[in-house]
Each structure stands twice: as C-alpha cells, then as structure tokens.
Image (cartoon, coloured by chain):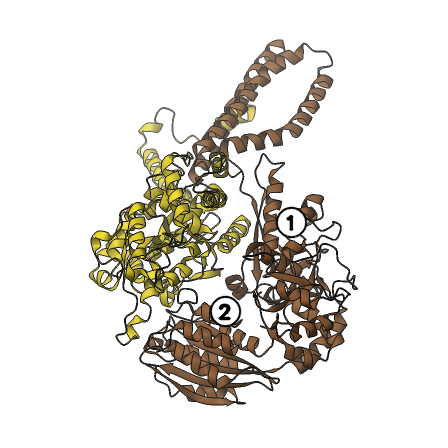
Amino acid sequence: MRWMRRLWAARPRLGPPGVVWANRSWLAMGVAVGVVLTILFTSGVQPLFRESTEWEKGKLLVLSGRDQSEGGQRRALINQWNAEHPEQPAEIVELPTEADGQRSEMVARAREKAENADVYNLDVTWTAEFAQSGYLRPLSGVDTSGFLRRPLESCHYQGVLWALPFNTDAGLLFYNKSHVTDTKEVPLDLDDIATTSTRRLRAPEGEGLAAGYAGQLADYEGLTVNALELIWAEKGDVVDETGKVVIDSDRTRRALRWLADGLKGDKPVVLPDSRSQNEPLSTQAFRDGKVVFMRNWPVAHRTLQGNRGESAGRPGIDFEVAQLPGPSVLGGQNLAISAKSTKPRAAQALIEFLTSPRSQQLLFERGGLAATRGIVYQDSRVATEHRYARTLLKAIEDARLRPVTPYYSRFSDEFRTVVRYALDHDGALPSNASQVLSAALQGH
Amino acid sequence: MDDVDQRRSSTTPRYAGALMLAAVAGHLLSQAATGALATWQSWVLYGIGTALLVLSASAIERLNQLVKRIRLRWVVFTAVLVVAAGLIALAAPPVVAYGRVLLLGCPQPTEVRVLTSQDALPAISEVARKFEQHTAKEHHECRTARLHVFSAPADRGATALRTSWPSQALREIGPHPDVWLPDSTAETAEVVRRAGGLGSTVRIRPGGSAAFSPVVLAVPTRIAKDVVTGSSEKWGDLLTAVAGKGLAIGRPNPLTSTDGKLATYALYQELTPAVVERRVEDATRLRPDAAMITTEQVLLRHNKTSCAQSPCLTALYPSDTYHADYPVNLVEWDEWDVSNFAAREPAREFQAWLGTPDGMSALNAAGLRPARQAAGAEFSEEHGVQAGLALDHTEAAPEEKALESFQKKYEDAKRAGRVWLTLDASGSMTEPTATGEPRFAIAVEGVRKALSQMGARDTYGLSVFNNTEVRPLVPLGKRDEQTAATALSTVQPTGGTPLHTAILDSLDRVGANDAEHVSAVIALTDGEDTTSAQTRQDVVDAVRQKGIRVFVIAVGDASCAAHGLAAITDTSGGECRDSTTDTLGDDLAALFRKVWGGTG
C-alpha cells in the first residue's frame, strides 16, 4: 500500500493547486486524449468483439448423395457458384446413392474432430438427429420468406432453424386413364379406390388387370411412407403433434385392415407383388397395365413419359396424376452448415445460393427436382412442361412430416415391424405396439 | 484474531459463490450463443447444475463451522473427502447416464460400418441386428452401436480396400468400412499385405473366422435323390452326375468369388479344366430349375425365405469340398477426415461378441456354422441341408500358391467370349449431358474404352438401332476397338427405339454357346422400347430358348426396373445396370470384363 501512496505523491504537478481545472490547455489535452482513446477503441478493440460479415476464404466441402437430377443439374449449379466465387470454391463429396449408407458416412465424419465438412445435404428425416447431436450450426439472419411452408418446417427442430430446403417431394396418385375415364371417378378416399378397383376388375375391359392399386410395401422406408399415408387417408394417426404415440385407434386399424384385406383374394384390390416392390417396380407394374392406381413419387412421371416422344404415334400408357386420398409424406433434402465449419458465413452464402429462386427454378425445370419455393410453380413454362406441377404443389402444401425425433431410423424400423405384423394378421396390431413405438421415439 | 477468522469464514464462501455465479452466467451466455442449449431439457439440466454449484459454495461455510468442533479435523476432513470422492467416482457416471436417458432420451449409438460380400449380406445383417440388441442390455435399453452392413459385388470391396477406398468406391460401394467380413481368409491375406504398403492410409487387423459354411452344389430337390448314391462323392463325380441329368450348372466367377474359386479348384483336381469349363456356365443367383455352385448358407436362406414349397433346392456336399470361413477383420483408417476413431471400440466388441455363446447362436440362426457350436435346428432336411458333415478337408482353402497356379489353368481353359453389342441411336441419344456432349458421343467413348480390354481370343460384333430397324456396323470377328469407333462416328442418332427388335437380332447374330465360345449380348439404351413389333414377352421367350446371356445398360430416361428391362436380362443369368453418363464408361468396361470371363 505504501508504494502506491508514494507514487501518488510523486505525480507531476502542472501548475498551482486549485487552478488545474481552469487551465484550458489542460482541458484541451484531456479532450484530445479522450478522442484518441475513443478512436482506438472503436477501430481497434471493438471490432475484435463484433462478428465480421465478410465471407471466409477457402474450399467449401459439401457432403451429399449422388446427383440424381436429370443431366447433373446440381453439379452445374456448383460450377456456376465456383465461377462467380473463385475464393470460396465448393466441392461436392459424393456419398453412396443409398440413403442409409449416406447417413452412415455423414454421421461418422461429423463425429471426427477434423474439419471435414462445411455443408451437409440431409434427408428431411435426419434434421432432428443431426441437430440434437450438435453436428449442425443454427442459421441466423436468413430470409425464409418465399419457401413453401412444409419443406421449411422440416428444417426446424425445437424451434431453431437448422437448414434450408434444397428440394422437396410428395407422393401422388397415378391413374390409368383407360380405366378411369371420368374425373369424377378420381378417388377421394380408400373406399373409393376399393370400389373403383373392384368395378374395373370385374368389367370386361379389366381383363389384363392384376389388381386395383399398387404401392411400395417391401420392407424398407417405402413401407413406412406408404403405411403412414394410408393411415392418414383414413384420418388415423401414429404419432400426434405432441409426440405421443396414438396408433391404437379404430381409424388406424381400419386403414391397416383395408390394406391387409386388399392384398387377399383372386382379383385383389392391392397388388400382392407390392409387398416386394419398391418405386421402380411399382412403376413397371403400372406401366404394364397391371393396376388402375399407383402411389408413387413425381419422378415416376418422368419414367413413364420417358422417350415416348419418339414413339412415332404408337400409343403408350395414358395416365394422369391426382393428389392422394389423404396427406402425403413429405420427402426431400435440406442443406445445413456443419458445426465444425470454420467458414460458416461462406457456407451460409452457398446454401442461400443453392436455395435461391433462380437455382430452384433451374433444378426443377432442367433437373426434375421439385422446387422448395412457391414462385417456381407459378412460372408459365414450368406449368406447361410439367403438367403435374399444380397437383404437386398442392400435394406438397398438404403434406405432413414423418415423426420428428432424433431416433427416426429406430422408429421407422419398429413401425415397419408393426405394419408387417398387421398385414399378416388381418390388420390387427401387436399388443405392445404403442409401447414399442414410444420407446423407439426415445431411441430404445 | 478470532474476529478476523470469523470474517474470513463468512466472506470467503460468499466470494466463492459470487465468483461461481459469474462463471456460470458467462458460460450460460456462451452456451446460449452457440446454440448448445436448444432444448428445454437442456435448460433444466443446466439449471440443476448451476443450483448444485452455488449451493455447494454456500455449504462450505456451514461445513467449516462444523469442522471446527472436530478434533484432528484435517485427518477427518481428508478421510471424508476421500470417501466422498470415491463414492462420487463410482456412482456419478451411471446416475448421470440414467438421468440423461430419462430426460433427453438415449445417446446416439456409435456408427460402425461393416463391409461383407453380397452372398453373406442377409446373414450378417441379421446377426448385426442381434448384436445391436445385445449392446442395449447394459445401457438402460439404449443401443450403443449401430451397424451399417453393406456389400460390394465380387472382389470390388477387396480392391477398394487395397487402394485406400477411393472416391469412386465411396460413391458406388458405400461408406468407409470399420469391419471387413469377407467370405474367405484366403481373400484377406493378399489385401492385408497390399494395404500395409507405403502411402496406404488403411490398416487391416486380420481377425479369426467367425463361422464357416461349406461350398455345396445346390440342385433342385427332385433331382437330388437320383444323383446321390449314399457313399461319399467328390466334386468331379457330382458334376458329372448332375450334368448327366441334362441340368444347367451355374457357377459364380471363379476369379472373384470364393465359392466359385474353391469349387473350381477342387474340380480341376479330378477333371480336365477344359471339360469343367464346358459343363458350367456363369451365374450369380440361384434358379429353381438349375444346379448352382454356392455356399450352404445361401441355399439355406433361399429355402427359408423365397421358396414356395420347401425345400426348393437340396445341398449336395462333395467330400473334397472347401468352405467359406468369414474372418472378422478390423479396418483402421489413418486419414485425417475419415478415421471414425469412435467405431474402433464397438467394432472390437462386435468381433468378440461373435465368439460368445450368444453370438454363436445368432450366427447359427442366420445359417452359418460357428466352429465351436453344433449346427442348430435350422440345419435340417426340411431346409435342404444336413446337420452333420463328413468332409475331407479341415482347412478352409488350399494353399495360396496352389490357388495361383489354378488361376493360370483357368485362364487357359475358359471359353472365349463372343459378344454382340447393340447401341441405341434413337433421337433422345442426341440430348446433351452435364458436360455438353451428347449422350451418343459419351456412349461411343465408353465402347472404345471397354473394347480395349479384350482378351486374345475374344471377339465382338456391333450394330445400332433406331426407328424400326437394326443396322449391323461391324460383323462378328476379332478386331480392335478402333474399328468400332470409326464405324460409330458415321452414325447420326434420330427416331424411335426398337430395343426389342435389336435384342432379338443380336441373339441371332451372336449364336448360341458352343464348346469354344460363351456368347453374350450387350444392349445400351436410353429409353424403353417404342417402335418394335415384338413385345417384351417375345424377347423373354427367345432369350430363354436360346440360353444366351443378355446384358442391358440403361442410361438417361431408361430404368432397369421401371421399364422391365431386368425381366429380360434375368431370364438368362444376365444383368441390367442403371448407369449415368458419368459412369457409363466404367459400367460398360465392367460388363465386358464379365462376359469375357475376367475379373468383373
């Protein structure tokens, strides 16, 4: 303490005591020091605590499944970004086509300490898992107006925005126009499908038909999607909005019984082969005229149209699409920033570029990937070239998310076991269905 | 003095409490800023933690007063501290873990990637699911590992591992494996040697065999009774007897598959290689009306799952047969971005678990035979297999040197490939790809590349199809790849797609298999048939009758499944591949290698 007192006593005295504050030069010097200090603080110290808005430089790694768009449009967009932003070039690390393999590699890379990813292209059902595990960085300062409501909803988890929707998808009901001639006959519920199917199967022109309806009931994610949609069509549900399992209801049972009963019989309503079919195989059954109705993703439209343009007038299959009797399951992929990325601002800029109206239009028009922005569907060229665009937009607006849980794949596995049991037991649920599914939602 | 002590004892904890509160506030802010506290559950946990911390600070004061009344307080204090620390160390982790599970749900399981062969995939997947359930037992019903089991066709997995899993493997086979479970230990040895080399980023720790499955001859059950005499028979005897019944005998590629290799090696010991090669044909899957060289587990699973009246096929066990022995190798990556270090522990656990009674029962139930456990109830006549085995060889495979000389014998004895290639020249082939080149140009380049790997005795012919006609460009014969490229450069794609007519025409031109040749048709198309007079069924019938393998490569708008192209190729043991303009060259090359009998 004493040394401080000494220091104070030894302070320089500039002028007689009492006159100090009247001395103008003293005042001026004080102001000058104050100004210098303020300038130093605002330009030197403050910026250290304020986030820069400049994009970081360096390569941006995008982990994504293989580019399935027509003519590699995703890659074309990345090339365009690279031409415009040579200091933040993006590179796609292409992962396996199969979703499970993609997820596996992404999760393993996300767990590494190394900075090995800037952007993830996530399936809509993975957002919760990646967000909860801390693999993602929340987005901030993004203008999300203009995105379709449902796809954008799939980018949120626990009220936080984790991603932006890259492309979306919704199931459609394809029908063979040689059997459904009147638009009034387009089914509004499951009973309509059964009635129309039975009538067509019995009619003389229904000779070539094997069944009324085809879906994807093989044991993979397709079964989860198809079963959920059928249950929703009967106004039943599996998991409600609060996250509670409500599978044990009459409406759910009725939907499952419709499916189980439909698969039986000589001229069944539901094509029995559906139980071993995925999307392309259903398309083949529909294309070969075996069924009146088919549930499929819009990409089947492209496959069915295919190269019909060069058929020299020979008739192919005449079909039309409608909305499913109930809400569709929402499909698609979202772009998110890796929590490890040291270039979050550049990564966010890349994501915003890829989901911008212009990029979305290109991806839809040339690549055939359903856009996540409403404005794209209003384009006159899109409306004429993709006849189904209007129906698809409605289907996406009405679509529902699969149960949102970080343990989605566990849930889906268990749900399929329940559905397979129901199909083998006339639509009856296993006695422990609710417990098993509730546990699966918690990851057990 | 007393006064000072009093003050100290009362203010220090307060300072400590204030300091802790400040620290917590700071930490809270930083956590909230990074978004770590995104859920209400995490806020609750954070709140509990903070309360504990602050309470403990004020508790020190009370404790201090209490302690003063104790004699030898430092000794007692230390003892209490040690006991408390011990208790906390023991009890805290399980209590915290359980609390976490209750509040937040299970922690995400560690991802373990398991690479196996296409034949073993269904069985290993089944076993992996049981292991996952096993990991949940001691972790509050939370699985600690998730096994992603995937397979690579033929020897592509081994090749990819040898070359440190290049980006093409990542795209086309699957993620970087943490466990490699191939069909045979013989397959592992070479990869382990090559992978350990300079510049390699992969280390393979060879493991022991988990279980085995003998290589058998699967025959339709009605034939089996006529062929078996009761005494022990060798591969040569059985092949001769089955061929005598007029049955086609399928064999997987002996250069790339374990079962094909081991059976062919044994056959060459008894019969002349040329005789063997004329009696077998290439096949990759079981058929109800043909015999096939395969492993017992494949046959058992086929009878159990995809067979209307059981058993469809019966296993014949040659006394001199070898077996697939499924070693469980651990794979470690040294690359900075893909090491997946977390998977090493669960991968080792999986390896160890396979040797426990639970693991062995799971293997047994999946159709495999663990060495130290008797065959389970699945192994019965009802499923076309036998429980007890009487085999000459105890070793899984012959010596590596012997296998090398066998390879040479096979190359000399195999029949020459005779391929007719027919290309789509319809209007849609002019469509530009991502690089700007039209599809047709990319196809021509792919053909040129693929033809460059022709063997010395192999031959090919070439045609293009559009509108309603098929135009032969190069007649069947021994020519270099330039001939095809030159002929194709004159073609202007336009018009429809008479795919069916083209395949039927190609079947006629290439001719059936004979003693010296194996025939095949390869068709490349970017759409479904639009202008043929013949239906798909006509093509299927012709292919079945002629027994010539048909391969189709589908690009652009074409789809193997959706357009029923696979229905044509499956009839004859061929294959349909969905390809993209990026991979067209590689896919064509792989098909040509396959039909010319090399490593596909």
Rendering coords of residue B296 (x, y %): 66, 60
In the rendered view, tell whether residue B484 sits above or below residue B208.
below
What residue is shown with label 1? B365
Have a look at marks 1 and 2 and say if they share a chain: yes
Which tint is chain B? brown
Mark 1 — on which chain does it sit? B
Which tint is chain A? yellow
Q: Is residue A234 visible?
A: yes
Quadrant (top left, top right, bottom left, bottom right) of the N terminus of chain A: top right
Q: Is residue A344 visible?
A: no
CA–CA distance between discs 1 and 2?
A: 30 Å
**SS at badge 2:** helix
Query: Which numbered marker is on residue A279?
Result: none
In the rendered view, tell whether residue B206 sits above or below residue A420.
below
Q: Could you say which quadrant of the image residue A300 lies in?
A: bottom left
**SS at badge 1:** helix
State the residue in front, B574 or A91: B574
Residue at (58, 52) in percent of width and height: B125
Q: Could you say which quadrant of the image residue B416 lies in?
A: bottom right
